[in-house]
């Protein structure tokens, strides 16, 4: 169950110079694949489906709930950046700055929402909940969360560099710090869950049932040996999980060309493709 | 540039007992968010946009190309599982096994493709390329790839347990082994790139510009202190990246309720919401 | 800013007879167009962009936050219905009830989430945030919210009739009651905002600027007068908003066939479609 | 069955000053969530599935058919606004007005359609038919239709203010008037169907089966009583439908923290999350 | 502008044995990529954007309008197949035929629409208007239309074979005949527009500006000459358009490995990927 | 199975004047409905599901593999056009060319990918694999492929005219030539498969089972005979497939208004719509 704080923000949001083009960019942090709707739902669905130790579930609830406050901050930032947005073609036709602003903003911010945020990304594409990664495997989910926070922090850094508005810089510096924490906490939890020992994820499939001859083999798919072989921690030495030795191997087919049966005499294909009727 | 091998498969694909319900489940490994189209495109787009050291680009090209062969194997497996799929209502109406098979398969496998795979997931939802995560940040991208392989390996393990067809079990055991390798290689590369030292991702944003007072603070969002505090590697001790000390703090607003301006007199809102015309 | 209650549920969720086919149906109430993710985000985005009187914003915050608790309850209900879900083809092949269950469930509940809810609808289609209707016009938004709750209550009633599990019936009876309240509250707010006087929405466009000769005219598009004319409150008498008199009129073109210019000589069309080069 | 009028338009469409940026904005009225494709399909699907009194079905057919003519008018308006659209980078590079125009238009209007409308919204996102709301419940459907027309009228008003082209203003004034009528007619039909008496929708679920103790209770989800209580028609007095008395109540859990079973020993999770094998 | 016929159907729709699983399959013909919503919108958008000779525009209007009648017939067929659909878990739990029916139908047909069609495909995925192919190039558009009708006819044939209901067979035999005509008419129009002479589409790009050395060359991408060379009308002899001679060539790179610049010092990448700050 | 060539490009990609607005337009050729991801996957899925003569499968493998190289070339072209893209609001605020560039580019090229291509179209909409048309019917699939190449060549021609960069013009001239070949080869294969004799597709449905009285009848849907009758190859004379004579007929209903049963007493509709309880 959830509660709110009467609209009080986790951190102050101030905009000195409203900028509708920046409002469009900020949308990525709300409805983008690396945005706050995604992480809020991702952590909450992981919590609600959590079948592991309770403390991970609790941690997910805390941070999922915090992310709701981040959507709120960013939605407020978008609304404040839209104050005074240009809207009239007549005026824009004569002033290239006004026209470029009108062309560079998300025009739906005015014609669809009367100057408010949308749950879309910077291209105006609505958030799609297939990006809520929640598998029930804690090691996977911690890595997925750290990845999401890494891309979120990248985005926030980029937005910080884009703007020169002091209020926006301040809000983003706060969000970047929270991304630092979240990124760190998921990796810390992943380490606590075993780190390399948690690999290969999942751990409850007996490795002797997999084709172990290719389990630590880097497959070279260059067309022949003129193609450079990338060497690194993955091509020789002990494997990341400590259970094998990395090696390389030139790709070669272990199977032949597949033989599919002819199309059924009832299939809607050209006659020459069908099997004879039985 | 790319080449093929005349349709020869990376590993043999055999189906003893065609099962159209299993064909539907296999689709998740082709067009699901954790499937092979996703990882093939993800690694290739990361390679094509790679601005870092060439060897990572090369590694991505090799493995992205290998994943194309996995789509091929799985598409073949789907086609072979569809041989003999039931299609007639009259027959189905009287036999619950036939009716349940017809109801449990992806009916488009027959009415749309004449018994062949589709680029969709196990629910029939088409693959959406927004799942191709490629940011240009190598540390992020290696974590994203390891995460993708972890979810892919989970899926393959689940499919392995679902089927009792020896050919399918054998093919999946091969793919599981390759997922082991791929998962390990991305984590190995991540370690090579610095592991904890690569955090917080990205590393080229000066941390003194973020609000460091909350950079390693786990925020408790329980409504009051009756809510349990999840303790673990993230709540105290040295942070994952070694640059701070984790601590916890009860959430509290640092900002007030936002004040948005009234709607423009030109906005399409109810009159009582508008500012007076200037 | 938001808080949680340590995972305590707004209302108890109990499942006596886990039923994975019912779990699939329940998904509609989570990720369907009439589901809880939609209304939670819809009310919160309306609040965050609210430029009208503060009390509507506050009301939206309260109820948007309550809806988060409903997602939580339903996600729990899905997880509990999945306990013991069948997964093995060998077993299913011989028992039509098991096969029909496996075919009738959302197979991703096992192969993607290890027995937990997904943010998708009953067909497995992920929630798409374009369904978050928030325009900034309070009268519109209250109608949109009442509509959403009406469809939500319809769904909950249908699910109530589908199940015979006492715990599920009890949870749904609670949710139906909340839908009663929410539906009523949005209509009450709409009445408070003027009801018919708030029409036509928006009210700040001067009606003398619209083509008033067709403002209260029901257009008959039957091909000729053999097509029945539907008579009712909309075809004669005072209009809903009290500003006009309804009448009917047979459709007829007020415009001619449009003339588009020829394709540019640079357009990628067949030569015979292009204008001559200048 | 349907007929056309040889391309004659319901109302004349004239463009004096073609404006490709305005063409992009107009797309929202074609393929946006509040656009004409949506309402045309919504009313027609409601008609085709109508199981209630025939006159509502007939009304829906008439107006659904009229909306097809609106798509036609708007598609023509887009095509006319695209005549002379700029397309060459060389020319644009030197003139900021040309560059801003090229950047502010939907570039697919030229590279995909040779200067014609697309079934997409103002962001270029294709229309998605999940927005066709048709439940079979007439009271719901009338509210949904009124809501759709309200958002459509808001959009048309905003577009009217954006343009200074006399032909476009004239066409939009016609469409605004039709939106006035349609909005009014659906609300009139809703009133005819019972208005408040039709609530709570649906009416054929016996209210004594719902948890009536919360049926007219506004739930306060503020974290404590420092959060303002929004008072209005929804917090006290007779309920909208006349069947209860509104009251308020502070949110509190009626349920505990859910207990999910451990993951199955066959689930692809980390070993420590699994139940012991049976 | 458009008119309807009071709901009279283009062809009679009768269902003797309602079958909700067949209703689900029929949805593909409504909202599938090869369905009637797609072709209706495709032909109408082609007409509305038509800049070529008026007769093609007129033809498109006639047939686009006819397709609306096909959506109507199929939506009616779905509704009739849903009469008596099973809905109660208690009953289903004991009868495998009922359970298989419930599992094999689109459960939203009951819980979302009260037994009516949806604008979705056989998997429940909503129609997406990006499938409306309309380029403004008549030769292309005629081929695209013939292709759409070919896939539509395949689907209708498959549905015909699936059902044993005499009314459904009769309705489908009618639709198949119309698909025969439509397929034929688009190919006839394509022939009239030049057939092979209309190639390569578009015809108003001077072929001497393309790299003519590869304009009629079939590129072999087999990894080496062990891969079979597919010979046919495309590998030697006169080209389809009569302007060249087909030949084959083994793929080889004409370009080198691309060199992208380092990431900007301001990009959110790992430090080792960035250019030095200027 | 597949191989790569170490990143060597099929044809050289050079950019003299990086142009981020052109980069956005180029995306259409990568992730648009007429782009290279689509054709690559389309040809490969057709090959993997091919049940007809092996040579068509082989041809599809060769060309599908070539298309992968085209994605690679275009992704490289996008990355090269993004070098030096503007990103700072402060700078843009004063220079209309910079502001128009920033507004006209896909801002995700910087904030999401650090200057690299995305698998999206020119509007930023991600590629959706439902556009992979693969039916198993060779005649259909060859037409679908020719259509896809025709729209692809149109796009490439348009992009060629848009740019004045010599490297881009050269790359596009190469791709246009390949589109010429591919378009020609699919039409050649279609001819080889029978051309008109392959119609109506599919050919294995006995035409005597369709309603032959309407199989070659162009249906006029004009509202009456004032609407022009479009005459052409489709309205009289021998049909395209040589099996009938085209004629025209004014549309008229062959069916009546459908009668749907009342809603079930258990459906969630208003009481007046329901059947009495049994």
Image (tube, coloured by chain):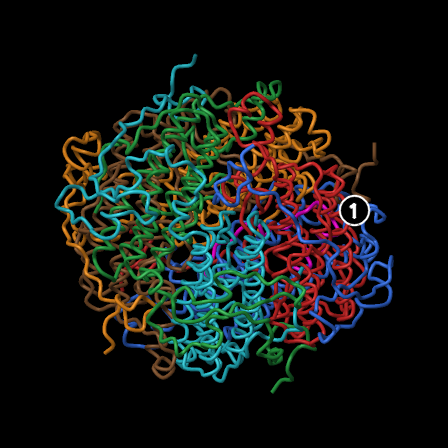
Chain colours: A blue, B red, C orange, D brown, E green, F cyan
**Which of the pair A100/B95 is nearer the observer?**
B95
Q: Nearer the viewer, residue D55 or D142?
A: D55
Split into 4 quadrants, where in the image is the N terminus of chain F? bottom right
Q: Position of residue D1 (x, y in %)?
A: 26, 36
Please tell me whether residue F273 is drawn above or below residue B126 in the rendered image: above
Q: Quadrant of residue D84?
A: bottom left
Residue C138 seen in the figure:
yes
- Total labels drawn: 1
Count residues near mark 1 (Cα–Cα under 10 Å), then give few for <14, some for 14-19, many for 20+.
many
Q: Which chain is home to disc 1?
A: D
Q: Position of residue B30 (x, y in %)?
A: 62, 50
Say which element carries label 1: loop
Question: Is residue C89 within the magenta segment?
Answer: no
The stretch of residues the image draws in magenta is A122-147
Read off the residue under disc 1: D270
Question: Residue A45 at what x, y percent from top left?
Answer: 63, 45
Q: Is residue A139 magenta?
A: yes
Give the residue at x 38% y 18%.
F275
**B150 on left or right of E93:** right
């Amino acid at each position: 169950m959830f509660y709110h704080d009467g609209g009080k923000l986790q951190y102050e949001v101030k905009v000195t110079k409203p900028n509708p083009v920046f409002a469009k960019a900020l949308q990525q942090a709300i409805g983008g694949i690396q945005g706050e709707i995604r992480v809020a739902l991702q952590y909450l669905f992981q919590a609600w489906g959590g079948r592991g130790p309770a403390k991970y579930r609790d941690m997910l609830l805390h941070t999922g709930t915090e992310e709701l406050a981040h959507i709120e901050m960013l939605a407020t930032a978008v609304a404040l950046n839209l104050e005074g947005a240009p809207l009239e073609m007549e005026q824009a036709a004569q002033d290239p700055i006004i026209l470029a602003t009108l062309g560079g903003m998300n025009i739906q911010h005015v014609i669809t929402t009367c100057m408010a945020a949308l749950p879309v990304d910077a291209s105006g594409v609505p958030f799609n909940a297939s990006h809520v990664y929640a598998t029930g495997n804690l090691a996977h989910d911690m890595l997925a969360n750290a990845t999401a926070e890494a891309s979120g922090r990248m985005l926030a850094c980029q937005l910080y560099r884009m703007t020169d508005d002091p209020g926006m810089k301040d809000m983003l510096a706060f969000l970047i710090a929270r991304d630092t924490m979240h990124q760190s906490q998921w990796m810390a939890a992943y380490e606590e869950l075993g780190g390399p020992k948690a690999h290969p994820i999942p751990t409850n499939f007996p490795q002797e049932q997999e084709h172990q001859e290719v389990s630590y083999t880097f497959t070279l798919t260059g067309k022949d040996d003129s193609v450079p072989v990338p060497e690194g921690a993955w091509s020789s030495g002990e494997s990341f999980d400590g259970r094998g030795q990395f090696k390389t191997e030139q790709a070669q087919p272990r199977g032949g060309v597949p033989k599919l049966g002819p199309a059924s005499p009832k299939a809607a294909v050209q006659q020459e493709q069908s099997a004879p009727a039985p």
